[in-house]
Amino acid sequence: MKNKINIFIICLFSSYLYNQDSIDPVYTGSFGSVTINNQVYNHFSIRPELAFGKFGLGLDIYFYIDQDGELYDKNWNFSSAKDTYKTLVDKIYYLRWGLPYDDKYFRIGALPNITLGNGSLVNSYSNVMDYPRVRRAGFNFKYKFQNFRLQFVHSDLKEFEEPSIIALQGTFEYIKNLDLTFNIVTDINQKRGLLDSDGDGYPDFIESGYANNPNMWHDNQTVQDWLDANCVDSGITESECNNLDELAEDEMQADLNPSELATDEVSGLSLGATYKINNNLKIYSEFSRLIGKTSSPPYSTQEEIDSFDRELGYGFIPFGLIAEWDKIVMTIDYRQSSDNYLFHYWDQNYDHNRAMVVYIDDVPNVVTKEQRLYTYGKSKGANLSITSNFLKVFQLSMSYQYLNGQKWDDELDDFKSDQNNTFFAKLDIDTSKIYKVRIAELFYRQSYVSKPFNFNPDENTLFGYNIGIEMADNMILLLRGRKTYVFDNGDYRPVKTTQVETQIIF
């Protein structure tokens, strides 16, 4: 704990040192409660922010304390170089140089909205959907030289080797007003998305009671544990037990199910062109392809399973239009796709469904988003997005993708004609005109379903809100909520994350 306090003091002191020739730093603090893994913690934090020139730094130094007064120390771990690195990066709320439209720009920390190209592969991705249960420190870098623009995205520096997104974008002005763009995106290991609360490398669903203990992951963690549980305590003689070491190792491997920890990579590539007609109109086209293999549909015969083409498919937008006016931006395009493909594969909800634990008859099964792509056959349709300010109070962002095609039906045990639609809406309220209200945001997403307005939840459903109420001068009560769903024995069970805190500006 002494080392942790020293780090805390050094961070605060550093903010004063950086203050030379800079804008006056801003210090905010907060206290309240947060729910992590269905357990409520009291928390307090201090968030110094400073800027000078193009440089900006914000820290988030926080402590979670349970009902027994014990510190939640997963995010204060200095036991190894790797854990120390994660702990320090975790305290960076943001670190930036410049602004997104500058020739040179980078940001470390929260990435609330990342879209690459015209969004065929990466559309509105956010690494903060699980905040504060999971704190990711992303990296967004942009650099422009002459007529070429480069962008690099890494979704979580704490998971340096296996983040949900590593992406590279290049944009080249081929002739005046015509930009050519390429994007390369990969998720090196989708199964890294499984919740691992204590960071010991074993997902929570395997640990069964040890999800918050980094030193334990199974009742029969060692051969001797297995022998004690299955041999000695069962009345078998010691001499007989000594001959069971090999059996114990086999049984342990079956129990721990290490095959579930095998890596599963998926990648994507897109090529696009955008032509600027005037200051208000642009037209574009984009081709994208996913690289990897999906699962086979649950056919009744082995011959059908073997003959199914598991290679991932492609999507094509032959024509799209972007129109911008004073208070409205509208995008509309025609699109079509092959089998085993989804537009917006890396979307706002990706960190929730890149890997899921599906319980069927109380047996856990790990399913990645890639493995579910067999569900989607050829399709074609349109996509419409609108962002508008109206009545000088509301800002509405809305998008709707309408596709007709083939989808797998479990009851028919075959593909059938169906729709594959996605709806997203976000409402921001200008709180300057509302007494005591400082923040008011509400958003909802339902993806890859036939009827998104029926509001039947599944693993692609996301609902959230942010509400801030002014309690006194320089004091705001903030309420954040997120709700997603997981499949559990034939039904979708909600997973809620709630944060209540009081923010103070010093």
Image (cartoon, rainbow, N blue to C red):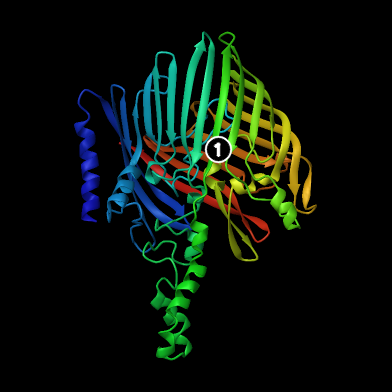
Give the image location of residue 464, x and y in percent: 55, 42
Judge left or right: residue 439 versus residue 327: left
Query: Callout 1 environment at 10 Å: few (<14), some (14 to 19), or many (20+)?
Result: many
Judge left or right: residue 13 versus residue 412: left
Q: Residue at x 30, y 46 (%)?
A: 85
Q: Amino acid at mark 1?
A: Trp
- Indicate the quadrant where residue 228 lies: bottom left
Q: Residue at label 1?
A: 346
Say which element carries label 1: loop
Q: Does 488 sit above or below residue 108?
A: below
| Residue 487 seen in render | yes
Quadrant of the image containing the N terminus? bottom left
Q: Nearer the viewer, residue 138 or 468?
A: 138
Q: Nearer the viewer, residue 143 or 475?
A: 143
Give the image location of residue 480, x and y in percent: 49, 43
Q: Nearer the viewer, residue 409 or 138?
A: 409
Quadrant of the image containing the C terminus? top left
Q: Does 435 sit above or below residue 298?
A: above
Q: Does 165 sit above or below residue 372?
A: above
| Residue 60 seen in render | no
Give the image location of residue 200, x and y in percent: 39, 58
Q: Residue at x 46, y 47 (%)?
A: 499
Give the image location of residue 266, x and y in percent: 54, 42
Q: Nearer the viewer, residue 357 or 286?
A: 286
Label tally = 1
